[in-house]
Amino acid sequence: MTLIMGLITGMLFGALLQQARVLRFEKQVGAMRLLDMTIVKFMLSTIIVGAIGVHLLADLGVVSFSPRGLSIGLQVVGGLLFGIGWAFIGYCPGTSIGALAEGRYHVIWPILGMLLGGMIFAFIYPLVQAYLRPLGNFGALSLPDLLGVSHWLVIAAVALGAFFLFRFFEKKGL
């Protein structure tokens, strides 16, 4: 059942990616050049909706989760790899799969590269874990815990900030 729910959720997210036109190469490049904030608006909106959904389900006792340890070393290396890959191919992993589904076959090689990179990472993960996790390891840390406030207050603050950010983008034509 979990796999079916994951498939349904993935298909819905893919449909939203397509509907928001963030699968378009021009949108990806526009985001990297800070000229088109469609992707930023889409992703920030999905993060807020996801946070509301996950925390609502957790508060109702339907799911449980706990934050993983925050390691600056892992975050920096992961962010660099993600950013370099996005800059090279003009798509992030999710949008590259969506672009392939739309018939853009030029993303086949990057997708194969991501799969190969994933296999290599699985092989070297113990080494990466041993050397990078200790760098700036803050343990299981969340923003609500750090601030000593409810997660709902943090979600509301992020949503309010996003609202004003989106208004700014619209005024600037981004």
Image (cartoon, rainbow, N blue to C red):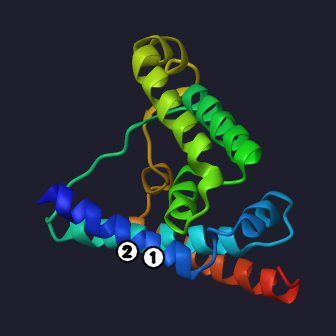
Inspect this view and state whether residue 153 appears: no
- Image quadrant where residue 123 sits: top left
Image location (x, y in percent) of residue 144: 45, 57
Image location (x, y in percent) of residue 36: 80, 72
Residue at image location 54% in from the left, 82% down from the top: 19
Q: Amino acid at mark 2?
A: Leu
**Viewer-side residue, 63 vs 24:** 24
The correct choice, above or below, for 130 with respect to 10 in the image is above
Q: Amino acid at mark 1?
A: Ala
- Image quadrant where residue 49 sits: bottom left
Inspect this view and state whether residue 88 appears: yes
Residue at image location 85% in from the left, 88% down from the top: 171
Disc 2 crowd, CA 10 A, few/some/many (<14, 14-19, 20+)? few
Residue carrying label 1: 15
Is mark 1 in CB contact (under 8 Å) with mark 2? Answer: yes
**Viewer-side residue, 25 vs 43:** 25
Is 38 placed left or right of 127 in the picture?
A: right
Image location (x, y in percent) of residue 3: 19, 56
Residue at image location 42% in from the left, 51% down from the top: 145
Image location (x, y in percent) of residue 87: 76, 46
Disc 1 crowd, CA 10 A, few/some/many (<14, 14-19, 20+)? few
Residue carrying label 2: 12
Marks 1 and 2, how far apart in space?
A: 5 Å
SS state under label 2: helix
Is 41 placed left or right of 147 in the picture?
A: right
